Amino acid sequence: MACAAKAAERNLFSKSFRQAVGPIDPDKLHGDILRNMEERISSYIALANKAGKVVSGSEMVMENLRRKTSPGKLVLLAHDISEDIGLKIRHLAALSEVTCYVFSDKNRLGELLGKGLRSVVVVQGEGFVGSLKKEIDRYRNFLGGRDAHYEQNPCT
């Protein structure tokens, strides 16, 4: 956020857009950027779901992680997942060498998939997984590597 405030102070947005830009509230700009990044991540999840590359629900995810046949997986856990299920999923993901992120909450995961509450999803397919990791890493870097909604877990 500090870099956006400095850019606004130094009128760099006007220079970048090559036109006059009104006063910019750095806090609002920061919030807008975060919402945009979250929306991009959500769009990739929804697109993967439409392509049939998402498995959701704790039992289905655990079964999927036990099968080590399909490469290119990413686990997204809701931050409000039950502790026991979360530990089981993280353990299976670690055994399968699958990256885990904490993402949003059960309600939002379910909304993205057009289903009810979902505490965990697995995104499959190297293209979707690569794109999601890239977007989540951008989001985390924007925040200086710290955020409760997109927290990478070592799954160990």
Image: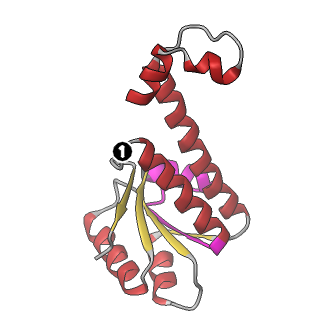
* Picture coordinates of residue 64, whole percent (x, y): 52, 82
36 on left or right of 62: right
Q: Quadrant of residue 102?
A: bottom left
- Residue stretch rendered in magenta on the structure: 106-126
Q: Residue at x 63, y 16 (%)?
A: 14
* Picture coordinates of residue 113, whole percent (x, y): 61, 57
Taking depth in this image into account, of 47 and 136 the one nearest to the observer is 136
Q: Residue at x 54, y 14 (%)?
A: 11
**Residue bearing the label numbered 1:** 144
* Picture coordinates of residue 135, whole percent (x, y): 55, 53
> Is 46 drawn above or below residue 3 in the view shown?
below
Q: Residue at x 51, y 24 (%)?
A: 29
106 on left or right of 16: left
Q: Residue at x 47, y 49 (%)?
A: 107
63 on left or right of 52: left
Taking depth in this image into account, of 103 and 88 the one nearest to the observer is 103
Taking depth in this image into account, of 58 and 150 the one nearest to the observer is 150
Please say whether residue 56 is one of the residues in the magenta stretch: no
* Picture coordinates of residue 85, whole percent (x, y): 32, 71
User: Disc 1 residue type?
Assistant: Gly
Q: Label 1, secondary structure: give it.
A: loop
Q: Which quadrant of the rendered structure holds the N terminus? A: top left
